[in-house]
Each structure stands twice: as C-alpha cells, then as structure tokens.
Amino acid sequence: MSLALDRTAPTDAPILDVLAERWSTRVFDPETPIDESALRSALEAARWAPSGMNFQPWRFIVARRGTAAHERVVASLMGFNQAWAPAAGALLVVLAETETEDGEARAWAMYDSGQAAAHFTVQAHAGGLATHQMGGFVADDLRAAFDIDPRFTPVTVIAVGTLGDVDAAEEGLRQRELAPRERRSVEESLLVDD
C-alpha cells in the first residue's frame, strides 16, 4: 500500500491538495528504511516555519528505526502508541526552547514549535512520507533518556515513514484507518465572525 490510498478530506471550501490529502496513519511499513532525502526536506520545511522575532525555538531528535535512540523514544510512548509507532522508519521528537540560557521565558516557543511540526508533516506528505503526531508520551522519560536540558520542553513525537499495508493491519486498526475523516465545521470553531 502506498500514499495512493485516497484519504482526501471532504472539505467545505477549496484548500491545497497537500493539506486535504495529508492524514495521520498508524500503519507504517516496518521494513522500508526512511527516505533520507524526503526526511531532510521535511526538516528543511520545519526550519522555515514562522517564528516570533526569529527565535526559532524548535529543536529535534531524529531517531531512526533500529537504533538505540529509536528504542528510547519508543520506551517513552504511552499506551496504544507503543503498539504501532515502532514500525515507523523514524520517530521525530519536537522540542521547544521555552526559556533562554539566562532563564528568560519564551512565551511563543510552544506555538512556534507546533508550527515547525506542522510544516514538517505537510512537507513529509508532499515528499511521499506518512506521518502521525503523538501527544501520548512521557516527557520526563524523554528528558532522562536524552539528557535534555530543562529549558527544552518536549512538544510532540512524530512517527514518520512509508505507509504500510492498511488491508493487512489488525482489524480494529484497519477500521480506524479507513473510517471516514471528520472535523467540526468552520462555523462551530468561530467564536466571533463579525
């Protein structure tokens, strides 16, 4: 199975194809190594994400499948994430520098790092990679595993790699992968539209 699986979002207004087609899979090919060129392009897109005052507070840990770093990231994952995420070609930890070396708070660090993660996932999709961002991880486990300075806050872990065979996935997982894509309407998200 490839990214040719049609998971295009049913949008209410036209959006870029790369945004409508991007989706978060939990089925990765456990054999295919990460496409290093596509990974590099995704990291480059993250590099060029918007950044308040150009602080660029994001940092990354890239842990390729089969490495000790990958095992340490997998060990930090919670619940169901430990069942499917190890098959990804790489796990990317996104961190935010929430304060400077001098202890000054960086109020927008989490927001900016989230934008870097979003830019990463969109470029990864455009480059033929599948992704899934996770909030289900233990930040303190990541801190300990990689000796992360306290001024850096783990924001998300992104599984990235080649889409696996959804049809061969365990039935419950397959049903989740093929379920209709849904979002609340734009109107339901607008608190004020004056």
Image (spheres, rainbow, N blue to C red):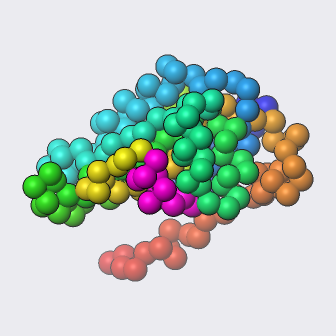
**Residue 11 visible in image:** no
Apparent side of residue 100 relative to residue 86 in the rendered image (left or right): left
Expressed as whole percent of the image width and height from the top left, the position of residue 79 reads: 67, 61
Residue at image point 43% right, 75% down: 190
Does 143 appear in magenta? Answer: yes
Which one is in front, 117 or 67?
67
Instruction: Identify which residue is drawn at 88% across, 40% down.
Output: 168
Q: Position of residue 108 (x, y in %)?
A: 24, 60
Quarter-wise, where is residue 105 in the image? bottom left
* Residue at the farthest left position: 102
Please name whichever residue, 28 or 99, is drawn nearer the observer in this view of the structure: 99
Quadrant assignment for the N terminus: top right
Measuring from the top left, give residue 67's x and y in whole percent. 57, 30
Residue that appears at 55% across and 44% down: 72
Asked whether residue 137 is drawn in magenta, I would say yes
Would residue 14 be found to the left or right of residue 117 on screen?
Answer: right
Of all residues shown, which one is farthest toward the top? Answer: 37
- Which stretch did the figure color magenta? 134-145
Residue 143 visible to the viewer: yes
Q: Quadrant of residue 4?
A: top right
